[in-house]
Amino acid sequence: MTLRQPFMLAGMSIPPATDQAQGPAIHVQGLEKAYKELRVLRGVDFEVARGSIFALLGSNGAGKTTVVKILSTLLKADAGAARVNGFDVVTEAAGVRESISLTGQFAAVDGILSGRENLVLIARLWHLKDPGGIADELLRRFALTEAGNRKVATYSGGMRRRLDIAMSLVGNPPVIFLDEPTAGLDPQARAEVWQAVKELAQGGTTVLLTTQYLDEAEQFADRIAILHEGRIIVNGTLAELKQLLPPAKVEYVEKQPSLEDVFFAVVGHAGEDDKE
């Protein structure tokens, strides 16, 4: 992807990083975006630590994909600033693109080609040495070796999604954006993708995951932020978010609040505050 013209974010700037290996992998400050009268983002702030999984949670239309598009230089924000891997998304867009991979809501794989051929193609587009070796290693990493020579059209939904994520890792990007990676998948396929994402973080990759599935964020995110009506209304670990609710009631068994309880409690309160 290439942007012909540089663009500017109004209102603020984040000091440049002196070393891309230091500081947070993603730093977002005051992002705003509107489409005519519809204010999608109304001042979004968060940071993502390197090598962690950060879940951006919200309902449909909350602005999750808009945040990802801005961070991946596909969309211009109206105000605010952001850095990815130490690079400003506006003034250093090329550095951002070299640092990231973006996996959208639908698997972008070629069904006519085999899984291995899909990976080899991407490696060649990146002008990498030994594309066949790179493909074989990624097939092994994502438990697709046995299916590697089969046409992707014969793959299950979970296999296609795992291949899609594997293709995103060609070139070893330090930051990967996964926009609703399990949307439309059955429970088994979702579990397969979850395992793949966990292995990404264990290998040092920073993952920003958007989802509307509460159990997904609860399963493996290091930190969770809830985006509601264009703002981050809570941001913390699962344990920290559970502390927002009263202690568990003890009847016959102890019932701890789930992330779903936290989500609806916080969103409900935010909605009531906005009406006042």
Image: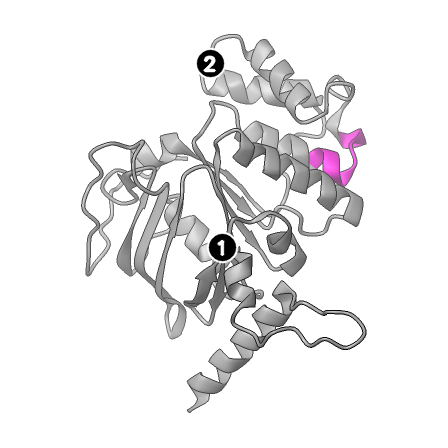
Which residue is located at x 75 percent, y 42 percent? 189
Query: Which residue is the extreme one toward the top?
Result: 130
State the SS at label 1: helix
**At which x and y percent is residue 176?**
48, 38
Image position of 194 with respect to 64: above or below: above
- The residue stretch that appears in magenta: 153-160
Residue 108 in view of the camera: no
Q: Identify the amino acid type marked 1.
A: Thr
The quadrant of the rendering that contains the C terminus is bottom left
**At which x and y percent is residue 114?**
71, 21
Residue 263 in view of the camera: yes
Quarter location, residue 151 = top right
Residue count near mark 2 (Cα–Cα under 10 Å), binned few <14, some 14–19, many ≥20: some
Q: Identify the amino acid type marked 2.
A: Leu
Quarter location, residue 42 = bottom left
State the SS at label 2: loop
